[in-house]
C-alpha cells in the first residue's frame, strides 16, 4: 500500500471516535446514535468524583428545543463497570448523560457527557444548536460543567451554516448568548438588520431586545411599529402584563385584568394556564384583604391548582409563624395539603425532570405541607390529630430535618409520650441538630422519665458536644480548596491592608455594598461573629465594599457602618479597567453580592457563601464560627469527615 495512503487511513481510524464520542469513562453502544434507537452504555467510575460512592444514579436529558424530557436509567453492575440503556425520543437532537451520587456529579472534567443525535451518520438538524445550548447554559445548571461560550457560539454558527432554513428555531438563544459580547458586535448588527425586515412579530421583538441593549432609540421606534402592526399581539399583551404588575392595589390589578382577559380570552373548554398567573395573584391579593367573595371567585377560575397550593402554603406559614389568623392558616394549609396529595403519585414528565424527579418533588411538597398542617394543629393543642399527619412524614424522610423533628418531638411531648420524644430528640442531636426546641423538649422528657433533673446537665452537654462535632464534619465535606488572589486595598482610615500580610490567620472576606439589602441583613449576625473572635489574634474579619453605584461610596460606607455601630474593619475595592469599582471582586469571580469567603492560614479559600437566606443572626454567626474553626485546621477536619 502507498505509504501516504496508509498514513491517511491511520489518521482516519484514529480520529473517527472523536467525531461520534470522545474516549471517556462513559461509552455508548453506538458512536452515531439516532432518534428512536435503543442505546446501551457502560460507565467506569474509577478515577471519577463518584468512584466508590453508593446510590449512583443516571439520567439522560434529551434536547429537543421544546419539551426537554428526561429519562431515568436503571443502572446495573457488570464486573468493574456500570451499565444502562435508554431509547432516544424521535424528536431529540442531542442529549447528555448525568451520573450522580448524592450531591456529587461526574462532569467529565468540566465538559459533560453530551452527544449529538445522528441521521445516516451525520448530525441531525438541530444537533449542533442543542449542543451549543448545553455548553452555554444548560450544562452548568444540570451537569456542573464549565460554560464554554465561544465554543457554544461556534456550534450555533455551524448549525446555521448547515441548516439555514432552521435558523429561526434557535436564533433567539444564539443572539441572547452573544448580544453583549464585543467580539460578536458585527454579527449582532447583521442579525438586527435581518430581523427588522421580518413580517413576524417574534422576529421584530428580538430585534427590539438587541437594539435596547445598545441604548438605541430605534428600539422604541420599532416597538411602536410592532404595536401598530400587531394590535392583538404579544408585545401589546406584555405591556398590559407590565401594567398589571405595576398597579398599586389589588382593585387596580383587577381592572387591568378584566381588560386583558377580554382582549385575550380563553376558548371554550380551553384548559390553558395563560391567565392563571393573574387569577392567582388576584385571589391571594383579595385573601390578604379578607375579601372572601373575590378570593373564592378567582380561585374557582384557576385551571391548574398547583401554584395555588404553593401560595396558600406560604400564606399559612406566615400566619402560623406570626401566631395570627390561625383558623385561616389551618384552612389554607389543609386545602394545599389536599392538592399536593392528588399529585403524590403523578409521574407525568416535566421539562428537565425525570419521572423519579417529579415524584420526589411532589412527595417533598406533600411532606412539607403535612408538616405545616400538623404544626398548626399542634399549636391548637390537637396533638393526636397532628400526629396522624406528622407520623408518615417522619417515617419517610431519610435525613434529620430540624423542622420536622422539632414538630414531631413537640407533638410527642404534648401527648405525654416522653420516652419516644427523648428517643427522637437524641437521634436529632446525634445527627447534628440541636435547636432550642429540641433541647428544651429533651430536658422535659428527661425530668419526666427520671423524676428529677439529677444528671441532666452533663447529659445535655454531652449530646450538644456530639451535635456540634457532627455539624463540623458535615460542613467539612463542603470545603473547597482554591487559591485566594492577593490584594492591597485601603481601609476607612487610609491604611493599606493586604491578604499576604495576614498570612497565618483565618480571614473572613465579606463582599458588600451600601445598596445591597441582603448584605446589610446579614450584618447583625456577622457582628455577633466579629464579637466572638475579637480577642483571637488568629482570626481577621474584612468587609470589602465593592460594586458601589455612587462615587461617594467611601463616605457612604463609612457613614452606614458608624450609624449602625458595627465594629467592622471595612476595606474598599478599586476600580477595574472598565471604571467600575470591582477590581478585586472580579479577581475573585464575585458576580453578585453578598458573598462571604473563609480563607485559611495558607491563603486558600475554604468556603464560599453566596447570597443570604433570612436566618436568625445567632444562626448565621454559628455557621460562620464553624467555618472558621474548620478553616483553622482544614486537613484534620477533611480527614475526619472522610471517615
Image (cartoon, rainbow, N blue to C red):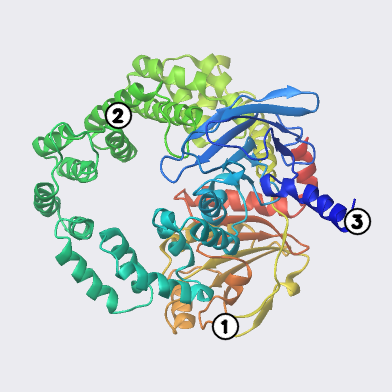
Dots 1, 2 in contact, CB < 8 A: no
* Image depth: mark 2 or mark 3 in front: 3
Please tell me whether residue 318 is drawn above or below residue 244 in the rendered image: above
Q: Secondary structure at mark 3?
A: helix
* Image depth: mark 1 or mark 3 in front: 3
On screen, residue 240 versus residue 208, left or right, reads left
Q: Tell me where residue 280 appears, x and y as whole percent.
A: 22, 41
* Image depth: mark 1 or mark 2 in front: 1
Q: Tell me the CA gap for discs 1 and 2.
A: 52 Å
Q: Quadrant of the C terminus?
A: top right
Q: Which mark is residue 548?
A: none
Residue labelled with disc 2: 336
**Mark 2 or mark 3, earlier in chain:** 3
Please tell me whether residue 272 is drawn above or below residue 12 in the rendered image: above
Q: Is residue 440 visible?
A: no
Is 355 or 36 nearer to us in this picture?
Answer: 36
Q: Tell me the CA gap for discs 2 and 3.
A: 75 Å
Count residues near mark 1 (Cα–Cα under 10 Å), then give few for <14, some for 14-19, many for 20+. few
Q: Tell me where residue 315 appears, x and y as whole percent.
A: 28, 39
Q: Tell me where residue 20 appears, x and y as whole percent.
A: 67, 45
Is 529 or 58 nearer to us in this picture?
Answer: 58
On screen, residue 485 versus residue 208, left or right, reads right
Q: Secondary structure at mark 1?
A: loop
Residue at position x 70%, y 51% in the image: 629
Residue labelled with disc 3: 3
**Mark 1 or mark 3, earlier in chain:** 3
Q: Is residue 588 visible?
A: yes
Count residues near mark 3 (Cα–Cα under 10 Å), then give few for <14, some for 14-19, many for 20+. few
**Mark 1 or mark 2, earlier in chain:** 2
Q: Secondary structure at mark 2?
A: helix
Residue labelled with disc 1: 577
Residue at position x 20%, y 46% in the image: 278
Amino acid at each position: 500500500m502507498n505509504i501516504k495512503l496508509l498514513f491517511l487511513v491511520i489518521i482516519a481510524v484514529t480520529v473517527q471516535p472523536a467525531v461520534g464520542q470522545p474516549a471517556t469513562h462513559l461509552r455508548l453502544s453506538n458512536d452515531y446514535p439516532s432518534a428512536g434507537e435503543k442505546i446501551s452504555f457502560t460507565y467506569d467510575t474509577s478515577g471519577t468524583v463518584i468512584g466508590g460512592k453508593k446510590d449512583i444514579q443516571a439520567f439522560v436529558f434529551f434536547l429537543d428545543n421544546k419539551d426537554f424530557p428526561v429519562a431515568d436509567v436503571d443502572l446495573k453492575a457488570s464486573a468493574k463497570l456500570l451499565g444502562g440503556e435508554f431509547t432516544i425520543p424521535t424528536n431529540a437532537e442531542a442529549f447528555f448523560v448525568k451520573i450522580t451520587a448524592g450531591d456529587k456529579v461526574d462532569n467529565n472534567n468540566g465538559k459533560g457527557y453530551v452527544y449529538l443525535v445522528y441521521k445516516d451518520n451525520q448530525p441531525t438538524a438541530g444537533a449542533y444548536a442543542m449542543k451549543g445550548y448545553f455548553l452555554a447554559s444548560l450544562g452548568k445548571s444540570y451537569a456542573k460543567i464549565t460554560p464554554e461560550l465561544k465554543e457554544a457560539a461556534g456550534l450555533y454558527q455551524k448549525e446555521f451554516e448547515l441548516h439555514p432554513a432552521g435558523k429561526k428555531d434557535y436564533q433567539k438563544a444564539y443572539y441572547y448568548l452573544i448580544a453583549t459580547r464585543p467580539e460578536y458586535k458585527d454579527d449582532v448588527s447583521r442579525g438586527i438588520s435581518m430581523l427588522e425586515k421580518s413580517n413576524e412579530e417574534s422576529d421584530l421583538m428580538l430585534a427590539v431586545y438587541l437594539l435596547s441593549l445598545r441604548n438605541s432609540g430605534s428600539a422604541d421606534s420599532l416597538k411602536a411599529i410592532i404595536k401598530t402592526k400587531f394590535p392583538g399581539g404579544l408585545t401589546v399583551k406584555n405591556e398590559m402584563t407590565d401594567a398589571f404588575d405595576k398597579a398599586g392595589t389589588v382593585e387596580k390589578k383587577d381592572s387591568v385584568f378584566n381588560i386583558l382577559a377580554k382582549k385575550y380570552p380563553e376558548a371554550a373548554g380551553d384548559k390553558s394556564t395563560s391567565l392563571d398567573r393573574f387569577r392567582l395573584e388576584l385571589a391571594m391579593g383579595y385573601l390578604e384583604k379578607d375579601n372572601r367573595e373575590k378570593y373564592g371567585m378567582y380561585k374557582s377560575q384557576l385551571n391548574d391548582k398547583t401554584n395555588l397550593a404553593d401560595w396558600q402554603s406560604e400564606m399559612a406559614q406566615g400566619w402560623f409563624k406570626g401566631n395570627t389568623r390561625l383558623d385561616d392558616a389551618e384552612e389554607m394549609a389543609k386545602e394545599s395539603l389536599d392538592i399536593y396529595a392528588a399529585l403524590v403519585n403523578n409521574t407525568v414528565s416535566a421539562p428537565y425532570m425525570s419521572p423519579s424527579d417529579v415524584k420526589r418533588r411532589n412527595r417533598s411538597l406533600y411532606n412539607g405541607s403535612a408538616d405545616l398542617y400538623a404544626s398548626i394543629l399542634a399549636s391548637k393543642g390537637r396533638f393526636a390529630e397532628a400526629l396522624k399527619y406528622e407520623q408518615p412524614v417522619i417515617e419517610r424522610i431519610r435525613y434529620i430535618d430540624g423542622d420536622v423533628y422539632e414538630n414531631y418531638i413537640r407533638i410527642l411531648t404534648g401527648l405525654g409520650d416522653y420516652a419516644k420524644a427523648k428517643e427522637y430528640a437524641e437521634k436529632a442531636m446525634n445527627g447534628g441538630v440541636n435547636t432550642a426546641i429540641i433541647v428544651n423538649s429533651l430536658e422535659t422528657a428527661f425530668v419526666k422519665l427520671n423524676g428529677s433533673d439529677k444528671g441532666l446537665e452533663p447529659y445535655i452537654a454531652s449530646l450538644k458536644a456530639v451535635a456540634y462535632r457532627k455539624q463540623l464534619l458535615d460542613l467539612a465535606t463542603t470545603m473547597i480548596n482554591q487559591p485566594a488572589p492577593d490584594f492591597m486595598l485601603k481601609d476607612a482610615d487610609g491604611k493599606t491592608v493586604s491578604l499576604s500580610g495576614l498570612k497565618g490567620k483565618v480571614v473572613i472576606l465579606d463582599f458588600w455594598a451600601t445598596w445591597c439589602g441582603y448584605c446589610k441583613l446579614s450584618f447583625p449576625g456577622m457582628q455577633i461573629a466579629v464579637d466572638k473572635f475579637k480577642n483571637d489574634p488568629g482570626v481577621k474579619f474584612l468587609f470589602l465594599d465593592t460594586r458601589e453605584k455612587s462615587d461617594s461610596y467611601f463616605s457612604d460606607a463609612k457613614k452606614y457602618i458608624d450609624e449602625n455601630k458595627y465594629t467592622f474593619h471595612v476595606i474598599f475595592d478599586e476600580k477595574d479597567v472598565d471604571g467600575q469599582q470591582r477590581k478585586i471582586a472580579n479577581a475573585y469571580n464575585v458576580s453578585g453580592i453578598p458573598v462571604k469567603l473563609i480563607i485559611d492560614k495558607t491563603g486558600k479559600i475554604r468556603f464560599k457563601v453566596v447570597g443570604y437566606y433570612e436566618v436568625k443572626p445567632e444562626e448565621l454567626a454559628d455557621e460562620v464560627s464553624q467555618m472558621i474553626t474548620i478553616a483553622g485546621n482544614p486537613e484534620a477536619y477533611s480527614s475526619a469527615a472522610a471517615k
